[in-house]
């Protein structure tokens, strides 16, 4: 028995020694290593197929070749009267030197535009052409023509021009609502007047608002370089389809800092079609001023949450006033659609047709009530952009 015990003890000792050596030098050989509570799982990309890798897009020349002929340069000139010399009011001075006509100077500015119809319609920004007395359009093939304004909408910063040139290369409209963050985009325009230029970037964000640029905002944000002169130009996808109209940049230096904004083509198309059909854009209006309902305001009004917006002002004699809406009411919904902030309220009311009756839900003294408002026509607004 004692001999068997010695054999067992020696065998166990030798096994433990071997296990210690293996666990120290080659722990990967042990079946239980890498398991248990400390497992780290990694997601590995599949091996790249060399043939498929060669098919990866490495150039966007096809998209540029397709879209570039549809992008135009816009030059506007504004007559500026030179102040008359005060001595011209002196009769003695005028006797010797005669009457001198007032001298006019011309101030030039530039931008870009997109041909949207072969019949000569061009889509651009309102602020590009708003102050121009004369508008000249230069095509990519070198042709030039005078343009007239069909109509404009300062609240979305869009304008439609007309030129008398037939068979123009119209751009293909894309679907901006399908754009996703990270999609590659190209911006085409005339930055700083150097000539037609293409820059590349990605979609950085979607549905940007509360920027204070336009009244109605739903911008595509991109890091494709957009500079002064790019305004009104095309933002296209890698297939050469139009998905936005380049409009503004965030910059403290006047140059691109990688934060540019474009109006989605879905919105631009709606505005353009109204302008072409009626010469302007008609929107609904009820005559109220609203502000965001913060947590502090909700607490002061003894509200359970920050749902809706606070009516801070009501125009006397306006649609809301006639319907009995008062300052201090909380606007909760318009025609059954919830109001989340002042921007959503503005958009919900703007799409209503003037003359129709809208159902508005409000909260007053913590009691909900329904009010019927006859929608009015939104007054024409002046541009919020410095010209």
Image: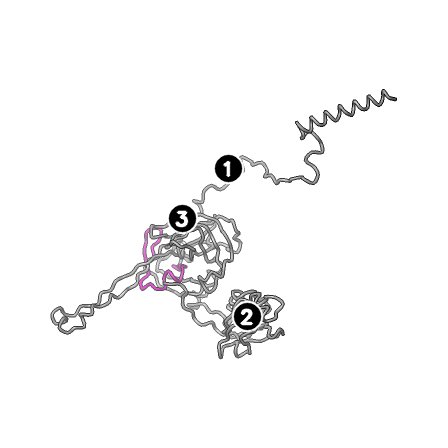
Tell me the element at label 3.
strand
- 330 is higher (above) or lower (below) than 264: below
| 330 left or right of 31 in image | left
Q: Residue furthest top?
A: 3
Point out residue 72 in the picture as x, y percentages from the top left corner.
37, 54
Point out residue 3 in the picture as x, y percentages from the top left corner.
85, 20
> Which region of the structure is painted magenta?
120-145
Q: CA distance from mark 1 to mark 2?
A: 58 Å
| 310 left or right of 87 in image | right
Q: Please name the residue shown 49% across and 60% down the image.
A: 209
User: Mark 1 or 2 closer to N-term?
Assistant: 1
Colour convention: one colour
As for residue 143 lying within the magenta part, the answer is yes
Instruction: Please tell me how crowded label 1 is: few (under 14), some (14-19), or many (20+) other residues with Cα within 10 Å.
Output: few
Report the quarter where the C terminus lies.
bottom left
Instruction: Please tell me how crowded label 2 is: few (under 14), some (14-19), or many (20+) other residues with Cα within 10 Å.
Output: many
Tell me the element at label 2.
strand
Per the image, the residue denoted by label 1 is 54
As for residue 247 lying within the magenta part, the answer is no
Per the image, the residue denoted by label 3 is 198
Per the image, the residue denoted by label 2 is 310
């Amino acid at each position: 028995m004692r001999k068997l015990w010695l054999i067992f003890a020696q065998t166990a000792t030798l096994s433990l020694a071997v296990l210690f050596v293996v666990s120290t030098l080659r722990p990967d050989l042990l079946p239980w290593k890498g398991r248990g509570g400390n497992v780290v799982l990694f997601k590995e990309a599949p091996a790249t197929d060399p043939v498929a890798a060669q098919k990866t897009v490495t150039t966007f020349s096809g998209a540029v070749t397709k879209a570039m002929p549809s992008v135009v340069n816009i030059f506007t000139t504004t007559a500026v009267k030179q102040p008359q010399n005060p001595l011209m009011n002196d009769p003695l001075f005028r006797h010797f030197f005669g009457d001198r006509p007032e001298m006019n100077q011309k101030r030039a500015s530039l931008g870009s535009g997109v041909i949207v119809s072969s019949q000569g319609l061009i889509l651009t920004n309102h602020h590009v052409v708003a102050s121009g007395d004369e508008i000249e359009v230069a095509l990519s093939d070198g042709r030039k023509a005078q343009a007239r304004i069909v109509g404009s909408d300062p609240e979305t910063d869009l304008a439609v021009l007309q030129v008398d040139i037939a068979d123009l290369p119209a751009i293909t409209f894309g679907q901006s609502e399908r754009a996703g963050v990270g999609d590659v985009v190209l911006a085409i325009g005339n930055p700083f007047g150097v000539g037609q230029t293409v820059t590349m970037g990605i979609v950085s964000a979607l549905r940007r608002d509360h920027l204070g640029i336009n009244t109605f905002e739903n911008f595509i944000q991109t890091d494709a370089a957009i500079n002064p002169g790019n305004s009104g130009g095309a933002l296209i996808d890698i297939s050469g389809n139009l998905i936005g109209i380049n409009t503004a940049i965030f910059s403290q230096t006047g140059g691109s800092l990688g934060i540019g904004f474009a109006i989605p083509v879905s919105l631009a198309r709606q505005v353009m079609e109204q302008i072409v059909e009626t010469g302007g854009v008609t929107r609904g209006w009820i005559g109220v001023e609203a502000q965001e309902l913060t947590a502090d305001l909700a607490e002061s009004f003894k509200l359970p949450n920050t749902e809706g917006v606070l009516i801070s002002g009501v125009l006397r004699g306006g649609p809301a006033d006639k319907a009995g809406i008062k300052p201090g009411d909380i606007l909760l919904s318009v025609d059954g659609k919830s109001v989340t902030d002042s921007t959503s309220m503005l958009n919900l009311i703007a799409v209503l047709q003037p003359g129709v009756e809208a159902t508005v839900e409000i909260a007053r003294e913590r009691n909900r009530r329904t009010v019927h408002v006859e929608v009015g026509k939104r007054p024409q607004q002046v541009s919020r952009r410095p010209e």
